[in-house]
Amino acid sequence: MSDVYTGGCACGAIRYEISGEPLFQNHCQCLDCQRKSGTGHGSYLTFLRSGVELQGEATHWDIVADSGNPKTRAFCPVCGSPVYVTFSAMPENIAVHAASLDDPTRFKPQAVTYGMRGHAWDLIDPALVKFDKMPVIASTV
């Protein structure tokens, strides 16, 4: 087992510890991630929920993803920082925002998802695999 992944919101009201390795690490260019981030994409590490310990109370809001499935975004009610996302289509998984990690250098993107929604001005490493939509993510490592 690797070192625990830790992180949280900007003010520290929400914290997390995650044991285990990420199932998937990606930049997502879907319209929701663009709107949420205020830029061209969001960056995430997806883990099994069973390895996640959360401290603090997040505010949640639901949105229908480009896939048509609901997902729930969680952010800090104090500072407004986005912290994690859960998915009705993959209830065993949770994705944390790469910038919420205590050590963001641990984020190692593997792919770009919803590349069909990307903008020419959102320059992402062209060597990354690019999917038009979301690929199936295995729920075990």
Image: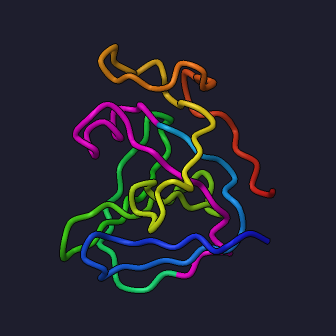
Identified at 51% across, 53% down, the residue is: 105
* Most foreground residue, 55 or 136: 55
Q: Position of residue 93 (x, y in %)?
A: 62, 60
Query: Residue 132 colored magenta?
Result: no
Identified at 32% across, 31% down, the residue is: 40
* Most foreground residue, 110 or 89: 110
- The image quadrant that residue 101 belongs to is bottom left
Question: In the displayed structure, does residue 79 sit left or right of residue 117?
Answer: left
Residue furthest to the bottom: 55
Extent of the magenta region: 28-53
Task: Classify 36 as above or below 67.
Answer: below
Identified at 38% across, 22% down, the residue is: 123
Picture colour scheme:
rainbow
Residue furthest to the top: 120
> Which part of the image, by quadrant, shows the C terminus?
bottom right
Q: Position of residue 81 (x, y in %)?
A: 27, 63
Query: Residue 50 colored magenta?
Result: yes
> Which part of the image, by quadrant, shows the N terminus?
bottom right
Question: In the displayed structure, does residue 126 sit left or right of residue 11?
Answer: right
Numbered marks: total: 0
Identified at 50% across, 35% down, the residue is: 67
Task: Classify 55 as above or below 24.
Answer: below
Q: Position of residue 97 (x, y in %)?
A: 43, 56
Task: Classify 24 as above or below 112.
Answer: below
Q: Position of residue 115 (x, y in %)?
A: 48, 22
